Image (cartoon, rainbow, N blue to C red):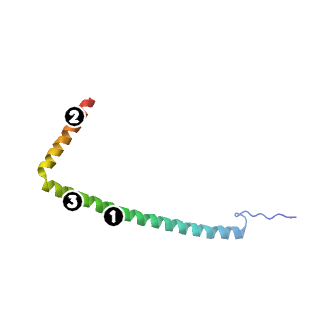
Amino acid sequence: MATMDRSPLTSSSGAAHSGAGMGNMSSSVQDFVSGVSEQAGELKHRSEKYLQDGWAKTCDYVRANPGKTILFSAAAGLVIGGLLLRRR
């Protein structure tokens, strides 16, 4: 009794079947990449808006409270400078 070789490399129907599978796989990979790209674009847009809003609020606070801002900045500078000098 003869045995049939079912290797996809030697079977013509196997080659056709694997070719269709590759087409489906590349289509699903393209769909995945497209979805990830859309999500990345949305995340980029939201993060840019968040940073712009934060920067605008910071500028408004500095304009409204210049004295507090200068005192806080000076205190932060003294603390950081003291920490750096202690390390030496």
Which residue corresponds to the image point at 22% horizontal and 34% vertical from the top-left? 82
Instruction: Mark 2 and mark 3 in contact? Answer it, CB < 8 Å.
Output: no
Q: Which mark is residue 45?
A: 1
Which residue corresponds to the image point at 21% horizontal and 58% vertical from the top-left? 57
Q: Is residue 20 left or right of residue 85?
A: right
For numbered disc 1, what is the local secondary structure?
helix
Instruction: Mark 1 and mark 3 in contact? Answer it, CB < 8 Å.
Output: no
- Counting from the top left corner in percent of width and height, residue 38 is at 41, 66
Q: State the CA–CA distance, disc 1 to disc 2.
A: 40 Å
Q: Earlier in the sequence, mark 1 or mark 2?
A: 1
Read off the residue under disc 2.
82
Q: Amino acid at mark 2?
A: Gly
Q: Earlier in the sequence, mark 1 or mark 3?
A: 1
Which residue corresponds to the image point at 72% horizontal and 64% vertical from the top-left? 10
Q: Nearer the viewer, residue 14 or 49?
A: 49
Q: Which mark is residue 56?
A: 3
- Counting from the top left corner in percent of width and height, residue 81 is at 21, 36
For numbered disc 3, what is the local secondary structure?
helix
Q: Quadrant of the N terminus?
A: bottom right
**Residue with the most extreme top position:** 88
Q: Amino acid at mark 1?
A: His
Q: Which mark is residue 30?
A: none
Q: Earlier in the sequence, mark 2 or mark 3?
A: 3
